[in-house]
Image (tube, rainbow, N blue to C red):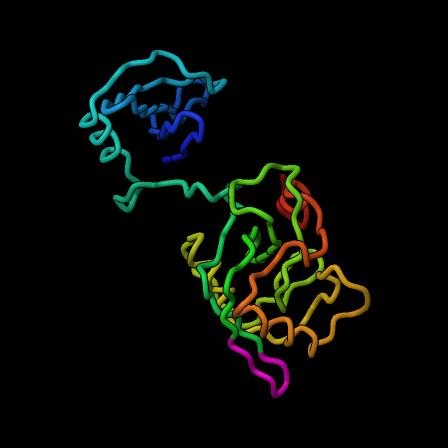
Amino acid sequence: MFYTSTSSEYQDEVVEYLEEMEWDEQGTNSYQCNLYMVESLGTQTFITQYDTTKENTAINPVVISPSDLITKLRESTNEDGELDIIDPRLLVDNGTCRVWVYTPEPDQPLYYNYGKKQRVQTVKKWCPLLFKMVDGKLYVAALRYGTRPKMDTRIYHVPLPNVYSNGSICLGDVKLPKHFDVDAVSKAYLDSNKSHLNYTGGFRRKGTLKNEEYFEWLIRRDSEPMRVSELSVMGTVEQFIRGEGCGL
């Protein structure tokens, strides 16, 4: 398993992987975790390998060559012979619950059918979205920024149909991919037809939002971006993660 990240301060790329090892007599230590630090100083690049303790402390630094790192990467494959890389957009992945950040591509359409009115609306710029999938259910909220949020980061109600006040999505006949992939799952929902406003209090406005008003707002999205300033506060990232069956 691999995790990659980049430090904005040092511009260092960290590659962390888990390599299976035999269980000991106490039935512990089924994995060995190593950390690789790639540092660039001028035109030179240095790769340092660290062992890690049970307390996730890096020890035993050893400078290795790029070819050694490539060999390690090739050796660390899953049962299908593929590298098991952790998407940096994932915030939680504990086997039963996944939480991730996804920013739709520019001009990603929004499909909305209501009665005889049908709209395939190109959206100039989307808000970054926070998704959660647990027990086959999908939840979504809006973020102000697309960077990795903290637990106390504020989240907002998404201005999308088929979403309840707690962020739960009415999937209808949407078929989510069997193999989890951040982009595939996110787009499966975004590319689906939406048919009703489940929650009408997602905007910072007084009164109940009517479908006619939503249509008017939607039409303006081809020239105006979605703005968090228009949306009502939903809570925090921590509340989103811990709520509704995530079991953390």
Residue closest to the far right: 207
Quadrant housing residue 112: bottom right
The secondary structure that dominates the magenta segment is strand
The residue depicted at 61 percent of the width and 88 percent of the height is 116
159 in the magenta segment: no
Instruction: Tell me the quadrant of the picture where the N terminus can be found.
Output: top left
- Specify whether residue 114 is painted magenta: yes
Q: Is residue 159 visible?
A: yes
Rendered-image quadrant of the C terminus: top right
Residue 18 drawn above or below residue 163: above
Q: Residue at x 45, y 23 (%)?
A: 27
Task: Classify residue 222 as left or right of residue 68.
Answer: right
Q: Residue at x 23, y 19 (%)?
A: 64
Which of 162 and 51 lies nearest the eye of the viewer? 162
**Bounds of the magenta segment:** 113-120
Q: Residue at x 71, y 61 (%)?
A: 203
